[in-house]
Amino acid sequence: LFTNTKSDIGPNPYRVDDHAREEFASLPEHEKRRLGYEDMLARKLQDLVRQCDRTVARNKEKLRREVAQAMKQRTSGSGKGNREDLIVTVNEEMLEKCASNVAQATLIEEEMASLVDKLEGLNDDENKLLKVLAEEKSIEDKKQEEKDNAAPTNNEEEKPTEPPKKKKKKSKEKDKAKDVPPEEPPEPPPTRIVDPRLLELEKSKLTVLLQLQSLSLQLPPLRDNTDNLLRQLQYLRSDTSTDKVVCEVSGNFMSSRDADERIAAHYAGKQYVGWKLVRDKLKELQKNGHGGGGGGGGMGG
């Protein structure tokens, strides 16, 4: 479980038989309790957790003494007591860079807010223009409808004025042949002409969106850089003892100045993962009444 770590407990002294384990897992609950293997496991895990808790308490006490000693050395002979500033030196260049990043981020956020307001105004203008265009189209459609309704009436009035013509049969057949138009491919639908005012609005909206995208890409790295600088500025001290913390699960020391990658490595490490499994399994067994957690083979002392 803790191979090649400070918590290594050595090889398992018992024989491991997977077939026997599968057979035990298939037994009913009362038979499992009669055999008592889970009670044995719970007692073993209790011993391990007690050892780890002693390590946690011992490291906390060690850290407390280190912090007290560091505070005593800071205040000895200064005459200022605990009022002495814990920050011993400040990197002016780093401080200036951090302030510059904060100011630049603030300007970018203000510019983005201004662009958002501009984009909302363009959207309002577009909605108003679409309403105007819809009204204009409605008027044009009504005029076209009235024109189409009036055209057949004029044709009907002109037809009776034409005198009937008599033609020979052969000439009629020739005329019919001439009147048949050649087959032509269907005409494509007329191209819809977009109002130039709408095109101008869409162009302005696209320009604003591109500006917003450019500014939004500048913010994350700027903020990350600012956070790193602030973290370094806040921990410029004469010692690092006050930056330490003790992991409540494994008892190991951790530094609050560690990068995110090192903190993630701690939580994925063998000791943390192993002790977490031990503690969780013990809680599960005690919940079911094993190892003195509510009956069933409790351990004395």
Image: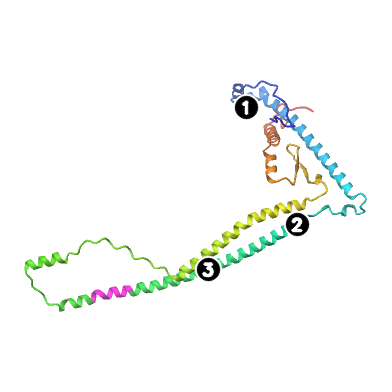
Q: Mark 2 points at which residue?
A: 93
Give the mark toward the camera: 3 or 1. Answer: 3
Amino acid type, mark 3: Leu
Q: Mark 3 points at which residue?
A: 122
| Neighbourhood count class around disc 3 (C-alpha, 10 Å): few under 14, some 14–19, many 20 upward | some
Tag 3, which secondary structure?
helix
Separation (CA) of disc 2 from disc 1: 68 Å
Looking at the rendered structure, which numbered label has been put on residue 29? 1
Residue in view at x 66 percent, y 64 percent:
107
Where does the C terminus fall, quadrant-wise?
top right
Amino acid type, mark 2: Glu
Whole-percent x, y for residue 160 in the image = 15, 77
Q: Nearer the viewer, residue 34 or 191?
A: 191
Q: How many marks?
A: 3
The answer to whether 143 appears left or right of 82 in the picture is: left
Give the mark toward the camera: 2 or 1. Answer: 2
Tag 1, which secondary structure?
helix
Dominant SS in magenta: helix
| Neighbourhood count class around disc 1 (C-alpha, 10 Å): few under 14, some 14–19, many 20 upward | few
Where does the N terminus fall, quadrant-wise?
top right
The magenta segment is 144-153
The answer to whether 143 appears left or right of 294 in the picture is: left
Amino acid type, mark 1: Glu
